Amino acid sequence: MTNDFKKTIKSLMLSNRRHRGGNLYTLPSPESYPYQWLWDSCFHAIILSHYDISSAKEELLSLFVRQFENGMIPHMIYWQKKTASDFPVIEWGKEDTSSITQPPMLAYSVWQIYQKDKNKKFLDQIYPNLTKFYRYFLEYRDFRGNNLISIINPDESGEDNSSRFDVVLGLPPKHSLKENFKKRLELIQRNRECKFNARTCMKNFFWVKDVPFNSILVENLKCLSDIASVLGKHEDADLFFDQSKLIAAAMRKHMFEDGVFWSLHSKMDIVGEKISYKKIKVKTWAIFAPLFAMLYTKSEANKIIEKYLQNEEEFNAPFLIPTVSLSEESFNPDGFWRGPVWMSTNWFIYKGLQKYGYETLAEKIKQSSLDLLEKSGFREQYNPLTGEGYGAKKFTWGGLVIDM
């Protein structure tokens, strides 16, 4: 990566930075996304760790200011409400936050920061709230103890209208973004009626055990275990490491079929006693997410890369990597999460490929990401066939190339 790219990323992060009430955070895009988002801030901290460790720490610490009593961190914080934005106003039932969460990337981000400055004081400062956050998932999103964590809304996956969730929402493979948004709003309304209680109510409407979410959790629990070890909290370290193994084993038992990990949705029988899990066999980038947590064996990784990632009829598009396979009926190159390239998913797959020793292929994804930035600038997503940029401008996720 050239120094000019690095300077551009630094300038973008600085221009999108905001301060409110003594808290620092970064907007994903000033015009389109004028608030703070959970996993966006985790990405921001990773980017910032390459040139501004202090700001990276502040970015994460600001998230805990609005942590719920049960440990959940909302996926949105409204530090300053704006009505002039294109972002739709949603009634979450909370005054200054949303009532759902997002993929748990916090521990990974904290651990990456620690790798840069080896400052145990920061780990001590953040540890109590950090562990409370991860305990929330283990207690409130796996209350049956099957070691698979559930999400209650597609937005909790970070992939709002992904075709992975069509069948659960009762939508056909081809539909409009407006139709999809309406279904998600209905879930939010039920969320309000349930008083945000996933354990007693929300499970009845949308209860998906998502492959990327659980893969990210597995990797983050390993990081949390490492953090606990550094702090001398060895019982915690063993607990979180064991939990990561239990989730990984449950994913293999329930999600794995024909060489692929598939997301699940659960159905309860008439008498409400037996739960069955149905695989959602839609090929999205999610089938590569387990690489990030090394959940595939080397042989399995070889097969999924050859069969899907390097296949021009599946994911090997002119610009890498489409979020939905070109062979899927739902594939739409300009359909938000239904085909376009997103830098975050490129980053996850890049990291996963590196862990398996696929350096050349990882570099190909990095170069394709740089090509997209060069061609279309820092946009929200990109057409995998043409490289055209779509959605928000001055979008921070492109900065993840600094960590590739």
Image (tube, rainbow, N blue to C red):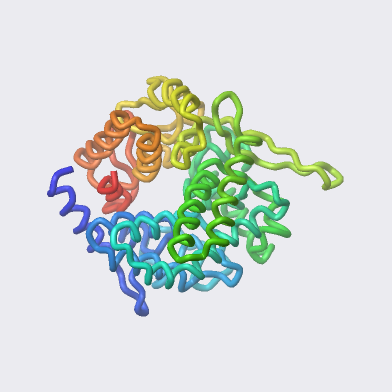
Residue shown at 51%/53% (left/top)?
221
Tell me residue 334's x, y (percent): 38, 36
Q: Residue at x 86, y 46 (%)?
A: 271
Provide residue 64's location: percent of width, then percent of height.
46, 70
- In the image, 67: left or right of 26? right
276 or 37: which is nearer to us? 276
- Foreground residue, 37 or 287? 287
Residue that lies at the very extreme toward the bottom in this rendered image: 21
Residue 328 drawn above or below residue 336: above
| Quarter of the figure that contains the C terminus | top left
Q: Nearer the viewer, residue 224 or 323?
A: 224
Picture layout, residue 199 above or below residue 353: below
User: Is residue 170 in view?
Assistant: no
Q: Residue at (30%, 26%) from the top-left corner?
A: 318
Q: Left or right: where does residue 156 sit relative to residue 46?
A: right
Q: Position of residue 17 (x, y in %)?
A: 28, 66
Q: Residue 47 lies in what quarter of the image? A: bottom left
The quadrant in which the N terminus is found is top left
Instruction: Depth check: give the residue in front, 342 or 166.
Output: 342
Q: Is residue 332 above or below residue 233?
A: above
Measured from the top left, where is residue 382 in percent x and y? 32, 39
Whether residue 246 is visible: yes
Say left or right for 24 vs 329. left
